[in-house]
């Protein structure tokens, strides 16, 4: 199956041909796959080498010069290593850009901790004015990339090798109701949708599907809670557990409510292996999710 | 086009304009080190004016070394980008002029800076952006300090700009010997070995600075090392070459 990364490269290549405002900035990662686009648009496909501070600095400078830059590498090197550049060269300058990562939390399980950044969304979430998209399928990744490329704002598009079997009908910024129930509300983010649907089979719960996690669609959460018998919310996020707990609390500030926040744990596993093994270790495979969700909802 | 006709103040007014700002004594010497370079840039080199502050064809000046911005604010006031009446409010809650500049608050300021090591990378991106737009006339100038070069981010930018022959980019390094561990072989070698055109000039000599900043450098980015008295020197600032 085509990965989100492959779809990103194909879509960005097409957009470069169509939109003279667009630029792609790379730090060696995926540079070979962008070679044909670079040959056609040498001024707008820029590979700075293994220099991630410069990756974001150049992205900010391009935006100041009126272009719409898309910067891309693995999340550790896009968000964590040049974090101050993300904060200052984009946010403090008051300019926009699209940051596209690929590698999710433990996509690169065998590479170890150096290539894993489950805290990327939480880090971006400390900053002002960012939209964060976490698609669950290559079709959704393409739709969100096209939407982001056409804008002027600051967007973090988090792509993963983990993918749902099929795409959902999505709207940027809106949590979709995938199924309705009365015993609680489970919010599945991006690639967590299929494990969640497997986990809640036969349970009387609402499942919300989120691909845009910032801004947070508080209205959808409130609607789901009002339609249910309980104000119990389960968050299932494919990155650091608890990243969106604050948003749920804010959405339900006038209601007594309970939140179970599931996601990638803080503890460094110090194991290699496969993404599926890491999902199980973090309790994010369907059997673990079913056990934890059932115990919480009562 | 020059901004001479628009200016309300001359070089001789800068000291009194700076005196309107108080409360930034920590950064006083740093502010003074940049004064002549800033004046020469705005008075003789840059193609910018308050009326054309958003003109796509303008030259860009990026103050990377955002510390001690009093000289910068004084020059912006002298050239009519900001009202000199704002200077006494320096660093107050409602003032647009803080200890580190914010581009969203100051007309004509291309970047906000203060955290060292950000301007060169932004300048590289800006020069690439102008090139992508096929705007070949506007030049990008970025002012950094010699101690600022301690930040590794600068060296990512220096190596990349040299390797790609980014000739729209101009770095002005104000060298007041303030880097804690110095630069073995001199600052110029850091640029020269990466393929830049490099000139060293007396950072107080206006004619020498103008010549160095405007020197041709086809196919290469250009660096001017503007040498001023050492920060810790007991000697007072020498009289500048005033036109």
Image (cartoon, coloured by chain):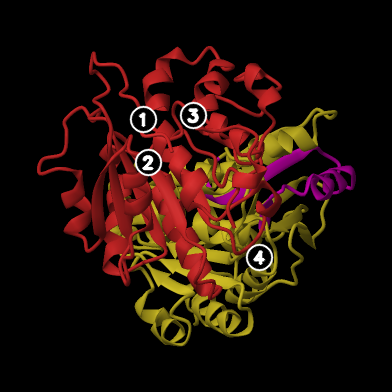
Chain colours: A yellow, B red
Q: CA distance from mark 3 to mark 2?
A: 16 Å
Mark yes or no: residue B162 visible: yes
Subunit bearing disc 1: B
User: Which residue is the site of mark 4?
Assistant: A148
Q: Contact, CB < 8 Å: mark 1 with mark 2?
A: yes
* Closer-to-camera residue (B61/A75): B61
- Mark 4 and mark 1 in contact (Cβ < 8 Å)? no
Q: Within the magenta stretch, is there residue B52? A: no
- The mark total stands at 4
Marks 1/2: CA–CA distance: 8 Å
Residue that numbered label 2 is attached to? B206
Which of disc 3 and disc 1 is earlier in sequence? 3
Corner quadrant of residue B227? top left
In the picture as drawn, the residue positioned furthest to the front comes out as B243
- Residue occupying the point 65% across, 62% down: A197
Badge 1 and badge 2 both on one subunit: yes
Q: Subunit of mark 2?
A: B
**In-image side of A236 versus B237 (left or right):** right
Is A220 one of the magenta-colored residues?
Answer: yes
Do the residues marked 1 and 3 share a common chain? yes
The residues tagged by marks 4 and 3 sit, at their Cα atoms, a distance apart of 40 Å
Which image quarter: residue A16?
A: bottom right
Quick one: A101 or B83, which is closer to the camera? B83
Residue drawn at point x = 52 percent, y = 29 percent: B100
Label 4 crowd (10 A; few <14 / some 14-19 / many >=20): many
Helix, strand or loop status at disc 4: helix
Give the CA distance from mark 1 to mark 4.
Answer: 51 Å
Q: Do the residues marked 3 and 2 share a common chain?
A: yes
């Amino acid at each position: 199956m085509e990965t989100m990364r492959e779809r990103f490269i194909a879509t960005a290549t097409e957009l470069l041909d169509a939109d003279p405002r667009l630029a792609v900035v790379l730090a060696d990662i995926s540079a070979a796959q962008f070679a044909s686009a670079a040959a056609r648009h040498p001024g707008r496909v820029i590979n700075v080498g293994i220099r991630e501070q410069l990756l974001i600095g150049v992205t900010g400078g391009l935006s100041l010069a009126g272009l719409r830059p898309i910067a891309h590498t693995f999340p550790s090197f896009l968000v964590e290593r040049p974090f101050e550049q993300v904060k200052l060269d984009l946010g403090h300058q008051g300019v926009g850009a699209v940051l596209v990562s690929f590698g999710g939390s433990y996509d690169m399980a065998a590479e170890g901790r150096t290539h894993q950044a489950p805290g990327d969304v939480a880090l971006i979430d400390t900053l002002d004015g960012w939209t964060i998209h976490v698609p669950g399928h290559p079709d959704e990744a393409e739709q969100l990339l096209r939407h982001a490329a056409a804008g002027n704002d600051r967007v973090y598009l988090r792509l993963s090798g983990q993918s749902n079997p099929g795409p959902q009908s999505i709207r940027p910024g809106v949590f979709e109701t995938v199924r309705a129930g009365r015993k609680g509300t489970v919010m599945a983010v991006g690639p967590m949708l299929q494990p969640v649907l497997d986990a809640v089979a036969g349970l009387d719960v609402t499942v919300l599907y989120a691909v845009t996690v910032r801004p947070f669609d508080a209205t959808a959460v409130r609607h789901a809670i009002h339609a249910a018998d309980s104000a119990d919310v389960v968050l299932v996020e494919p990155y650091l557990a608890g990243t969106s707990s604050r948003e749920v609390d804010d959405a339900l500030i006038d209601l007594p409510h309970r939140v179970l926040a599931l996601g990638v744990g803080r503890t460094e596993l110090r194991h290699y292996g496969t993404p599926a093994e890491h999902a199980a270790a973090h309790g994010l495979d369907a059997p673990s999710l079913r056990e934890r969700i059932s115990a919480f909802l009562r | 086009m020059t901004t001479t006709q628009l200016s309300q103040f001359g070089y001789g007014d800068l000291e009194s304009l700076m005196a309107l700002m108080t409360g930034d004594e920590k950064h006083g010497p740093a502010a003074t080190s940049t004064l002549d370079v800033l004046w020469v840039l705005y008075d003789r080199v840059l193609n910018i004016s308050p009326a054309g502050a958003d003109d796509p064809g303008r030259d860009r000046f990026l103050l990377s070394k955002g510390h001690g911005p009093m000289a910068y604010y004084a020059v912006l006031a002298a050239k009519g980008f900001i009202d000199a009446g704002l200077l006494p409010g320096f660093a107050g809650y409602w003032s647009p002029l803080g200890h580190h500049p914010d581009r969203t608050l100051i007309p004509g300021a291309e970047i906000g800076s203060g955290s060292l090591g950000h301007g060169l990378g932004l300048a590289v991106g800006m020069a690439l952006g102008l090139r992508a737009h096929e705007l070949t006339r506007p030049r990008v100038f970025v002012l950094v300090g010699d101690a600022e070069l301690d930040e590794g981010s600068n060296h990512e930018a220096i190596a990349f700009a040299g390797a790609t022959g980014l000739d729209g980019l101009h770095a002005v390094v104000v060298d007041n010997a303030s880097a804690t561990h110095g630069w073995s072989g001199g600052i110029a070698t850091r640029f020269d070995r990466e393929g830049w055109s490099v000139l060293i000039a007396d950072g107080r000599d206006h004619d020498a600075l103008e010549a160095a900043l405007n020197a041709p450098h086809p196919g290469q980015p250009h660096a001017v090392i503007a040498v001023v008295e050492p920060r810790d020197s007991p000697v007072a600032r020498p009289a500048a070459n005033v036109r």
